[in-house]
């Protein structure tokens, strides 16, 4: 069984930065995609970013492009989401999720992911 453990959330003012970490252990293959999702109260979970660990390719939702950066530390099986220029509307619970190939749906489809972290809260005040 794979396990994902997140850390790095917190409270910041608008314009601030945070870096989320997601440590992967257990089953998870060396070649997988890691998605970052978020869910605000009363809203559906939405895809924020993804990184394909084999190729290093990254994908971003339009609303975070240029502000968020997904990266990986392959040696330590840890994925990161660097968030800058944070806005109050970025406030949400953030989750990392892992999916192994073959990939059927797009990176932002949460139902495609098998393993999920516990979530970490990000709160951005104006």
Image (cartoon, grey):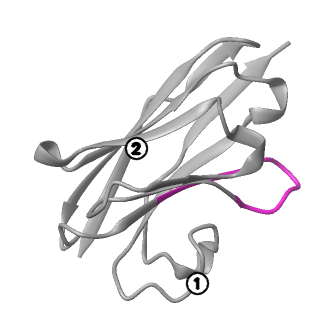
Q: Residue at x 74, y 21 (%)?
A: 124
Measuring from the top left, give residue 86's x and y in whole percent. 71, 22
Q: Residue at x 34, y 78 (%)?
A: 100
Give left or right: position of 113 versus 75: right
Secondary structure beneath disc 1?
Answer: loop
Measuring from the top left, give residue 3's x and y in whole percent. 29, 63
The vertical placement of 83 against 22, above or below, is above
- Crowding at mark 1 (Cα within 10 Å: few <14, some 14-19, many 20+): few
Closer to the camera in the image, 41 or 47: 47
First reached walking from the N terminus: tag 2 or tag 1: 2
Which region is colored magenta? 35-46
- Residue 76 image-quadrant placement: top left
Q: How many numbered discs?
A: 2
Measuring from the top left, give residue 33's x and y in whole percent. 39, 66
The vertical placement of 5 against 92, above or below, is below
Q: Residue at x 37, y 41 (%)?
A: 71
Is the residue under label 1 in contact with that under label 2 (CB below 8 Å)?
A: no
Q: Which mark is residue 47?
A: none
Closer to the camera in the image, 54 or 119: 54
- Check disc 2 and report the residue beneath it: 6
Measuring from the top left, give residue 104's x and y in whole percent. 51, 89
Give left or right: position of 56 versus 66: left
- Residue 24 image-quadrant placement: bottom left
Give left or right: position of 79 versus 47: left
Q: Residue at x 69, y 18 (%)?
A: 85
- Check disc 1 and report the residue beneath it: 105
Closer to the camera in the image, 83 or 38: 83
């Amino acid at each position: 069984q794979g396990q994902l453990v997140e850390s790095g959330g917190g409270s910041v003012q608008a314009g601030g930065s945070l870096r989320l970490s997601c440590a992967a252990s257990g089953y998870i293959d060396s070649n997988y995609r890691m998605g970052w999702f978020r869910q605000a109260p009363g809203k559906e979970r939405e895809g924020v970013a993804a990184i394909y660990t084999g190729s290093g390719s990254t994908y971003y939702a339009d609303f975070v492009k240029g502000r968020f950066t997904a990266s990986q530390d392959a040696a330590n099986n840890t994925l990161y989401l660097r968030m800058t220029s944070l806005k109050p509307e970025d406030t949400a619970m953030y989750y990392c999720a892992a999916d192994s190939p073959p990939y059927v749906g797009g990176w932002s489809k949460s139902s495609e992911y098998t393993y999920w972290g516990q979530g970490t809260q990000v709160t951005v005040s104006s």
